[in-house]
Image (cartoon, helix red, strand yellow):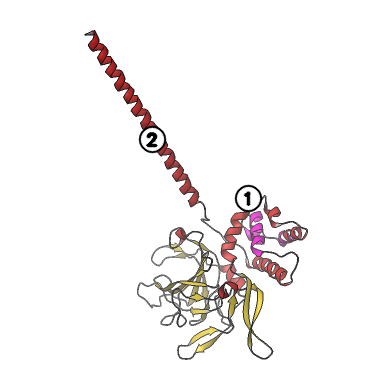
Amino acid sequence: MIMKSIHIKKNCIICISLLILVIFLSSTLIFYFSQKHLQSIEVNADSEEDYIKWVDFTVPCNVLKLTSELDINSHNNNEEITYNWIELLAYLACIYGGNFKNFQSSDLNKIVENLENGKTMEELTSTLTFYDYYLEAYSAILSGFIGNYAIETMNENNEKVFEKKYGLKAFSPIAKNYYFTHYKDFGNSRSYGFKRTHLGNDLMGSIGTPIIAVESGIVEQLGWNQYGGWRVGIRSFDGKRYYYYAHLRKDHPYVEGLEKGDTVKAGDVIGYLGMTGYSIKENVNNINVAHLHFGIQLIFDESQVDSPNEIWIDVYEIIEFLKTNTSEVYLSNEETKDYSRKYDLMEEFLTE
């Protein structure tokens, strides 16, 4: 009996030891995989935070003009100090917290003075927490607007020749000598289909007014949309900007030959102002007033394309700014009544 009792106790000890070992190994494995899972979540969280989620663009036209003139003049005059208008705007945005209602020209003059006295932009912005954010955000909006290009002009022999320039190479979406009006309507309520906010700027004009590509890029969308009617979507070459032109003309919305995937140049005629849209059925005029709906979507990550995470900016001040650079057009096809730009443009990346 004593030997039997000892044997039972020995078996119990072995079982308990095995149970403890199993519990220990299980706990170790659970801890290991939980740590791996947490690391995975952290990596995913980091990747999700690796791009900008929202931009509120409030820079007024007069500030765009002042900073662009500093940039353009310093380059064209071969000055020792050349300015980058986007860097200047990003600096100002930092000191105003993005609210340009507080803008004072003395603040811009102070930046210029510091740069002329030998300070670098890196030194001036080293303590500005959100400078990198504003620089990236404003670059996404404006980086295609100013730079080197060549534009056709007439020489003394009345011949067209290309003249190299540095300056504003983005155009107003309305052709030269065509009248339009607009007002600040970004964020206004819209109710067709469902209640939503207006994510663009409406430019009221006459039906058939030639619509111009603001910037060079690739035609990404072309065709009917029940909200925008006949519309064109053009993606900038750097992929950061999607230009949306909507409510184009019934029956003949686009310039002849325009197709999805085409490359267009800034200043090209792409279509004609109309009043189509607000209809599931194609080619219907359901818009009360003839106008161009113009919008700019910013894209920092492809997940933001056609999703609830889209970033659309208020373009009213941009339209005001671009009024100084309009594309002159002429009737190039009597049969189709199509218009073309009068003076061609070349950009470095289009000729490489």
Considering only order in the chain, which callout, 2 or 1, is on the residue closer to the N terminus? 2
88 displayed left or right of 211: right
Q: Is residue 121 left or right of residue 22?
A: right
Residue in view at x 63 percent, y 60 percent: 100
Give neighbour class at mark 1: few <14, some 14-19, many 20+ (Cα, 10 Å).
Answer: few
For this view, does 170 lie left or right of residue 70? left
* Residue in front for this viewpoint, 262 or 101: 262
Work out which residue is located at the far top of the displayed protein and give it: 2
Can I make out residue 279 in this image? yes
**Can you tell which quarter of the image residue 36 is in?**
top left
Asked whether residue 88 is drawn in magenta, I would say yes
Query: Which residues, given as a range, are shown in magenta?
Result: 80-109
**Which of the pair 230/242 is nearer the observer?**
242
Q: For residue 223, which quarter of the picture? A: bottom left
Report the residue marked by disc 2. Answer: 30
Q: Residue at x 60, y 73 (%)?
A: 348
Q: Residues within 10 Å of mark 2 (few under 14, many from 20)?
A: few
